[in-house]
Image (tube, rainbow, N blue to C red):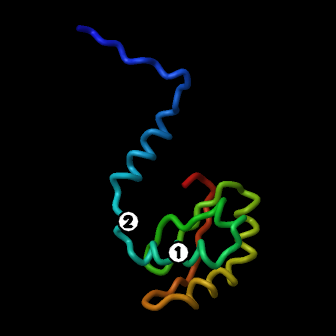
Amino acid sequence: MNKKRPRKSESIHIKEVLSSVIRTCRKESNTVLSEIKKTWNAELDKIITDHAQPTALKGSILLITVKSSTLSHQLRYLTNDILYVINNRAENYRISELKIKTGSF
């Protein structure tokens, strides 16, 4: 009557579990941000897009989350080029500033 679940050999950190659950529950409500993400992934180098992604948009300020501080410094030098690429493809929005933070996405 008491069936025991088989135990997995590996432990998973709660942060990974929660982030995957939240990602499946949360809709991409911000369509402008989803357009920016598409442009970001299509126009920028794969090395950058693998380690940095747009994560939030507040007004005309775009928040970029970067996995390493080294890449965040590099992106600061590329800010004007990135703004040009994103705004060039934009139809109904304009990004005036990038905020770059180190973290996970």
Q: Identify the amino acid type marked 2.
A: Glu
| Number of numbered discs on residues | 2
Occupied quadrant, residue 98: bottom right
Above or below, comparing residue 2 to residue 71 in the picture: above
Circle 1 crowding by C-alpha within 10 Å: few under 14, some 14–19, many from 20 = few
Q: Quadrant of the C terminus?
A: bottom right
As drawn, the label of residue 28 is 2
Please state if 93 lies on the left or on the right of 65 as rendered.
Answer: left
Residue under pointer 1: 38
Check disc 1 and give the amino acid type: Lys
Residue at 30% x, 12% y: name it.
3
Contact, mark 2 vs mark 1 (Cβ under 8 Å): no
Q: Residue at x 67, y 75 (%)?
A: 44
Q: Position of residue 75 (x, y in %)?
A: 71, 70
Task: First in sequence, mark 2 or 1: give its number.
Answer: 2
Residue 36 % position (x, y): 51, 76
The kind of secondary structure element at disc 1 is: helix
At 60% from the left and 53% from the top, the residue drawn is: 103
